[in-house]
Amino acid sequence: MNLEISVSVKGVFNRNGKYLLRKNRREEYELLGGKLERTDQSTVERLIQEYKEESGIGIAVQELRHPWLYKIGREQTLIVPYVCTAEYIPEVLFDEDGGQLDWIEEADIENLNMPVGYKDTIANRLPQISISNVPKHQKLYRDDRFQVVFIFMKNGCIFLKETLKKDQAPYNLFCQNFTPREVGRLSPKKAISSPDKIEIYYEYNEEP
């Protein structure tokens, strides 16, 4: 059965060897960003808006990194991360949603209370799946849901399309269609969203 899940767009921002992270209500660190909405023009637009609201920083969105599946309680979310650079940084950072913002040294990332998917994203590793528990008193809101389609290209031509299934992580989808060696040749290129679907494009890089 095809899966329709919420999508959260996140930004990896490094400044002078430190990463900007946010501590949430679960006392976990995470990358800044937020949930994609059906009315959004693009994933990039949503990330720019969320980053501004959560820090005051104006960003430019650069390369896409590997999306991954995040299970929070019984909810599933696709994390779509990008590398960002700053166009404007205010003197004082402020999160309108009340999160705690910290600059964290790269060497300290692995020891943080933070889902492993975020750690993999920062290190530019291929994430598998991350799971977080939800405190009983904390309510999860039902966000907009999207069908997720992965599109694989070779030399700019599409050769495979796969729709994410229920309880299927992108990593597992890759392993079902490619050998471990071939998975290492996949590079995320772009994410295109519409009111009911998000398409993630990958380039398969041939060996020289």
Image (cartoon, rainbow, N blue to C red):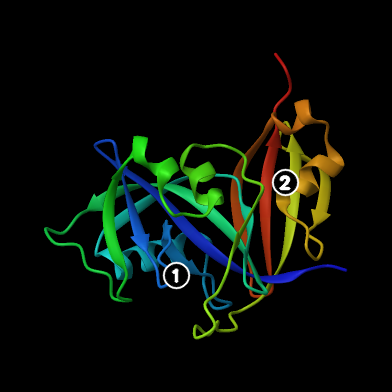
Q: Is residue 175 left or right of residue 49?
A: right
- In depth, the one of 119 and 148 nearer the eye is 119
> In the rendering, at what x and y percent does residue 125 appear?
57, 37
Q: Residue most toward the left?
A: 91
Please determine whether, in this image, residue 180 is positioned above or below residue 37: above
Above or below: residue 174 compared with residue 150: above
As drawn, 160 above or below 96: above
Residue in view at x 75 percent, y 43 percent: 152
What residue do we see at 28% from left, 75% from top? 96
Residue 58 lies left or right of residue 9; in this view the side is left
Is residue 64 something one can see in this rendering?
no
Instruction: Judge whether residue 112 can be spotted in this image.
Output: yes
Mark 2 or 1, closer to the camera = 1
Task: Sort mark 1 into few (<14), some (14-19) or many (20+) by Cα contacts within 10 Å.
Answer: few
Q: Where residue 153 appears, x then y in whole percent? A: 74, 39
Q: What SS does tag 2 mark?
A: helix
Relative placement, left or right, of 119 versus 172 is: left
Give the residue type that dot 2 points to: Tyr
The amino acid marked with disc number 1 is Arg
Query: Can you say which quadrant of the picture contains the C terminus?
Result: top right
Tell which circle, 2 or 1, labels the residue nearer the N-terminal end. 1
The residue that label 1 is drawn on is: 26
The circle on residue 171 is 2
**In the displayed structure, would residue 80 be above or below residue 65?**
below
Residue situated in front as seen by the camera: 26 or 13: 26
Residue at 77% x, 43% y is: 174
Quarter of the image holding residue 78?
A: bottom right
Quarter of the figure that contains the N terminus: bottom right
Residue under the image location 78 percent in, 63 percent down: 167
Q: Quadrant of residue 140?
A: bottom right
What x and y, as percent, mark residue 180? 78, 30
The image position of residue 104, as x and y in percent, is 30, 46
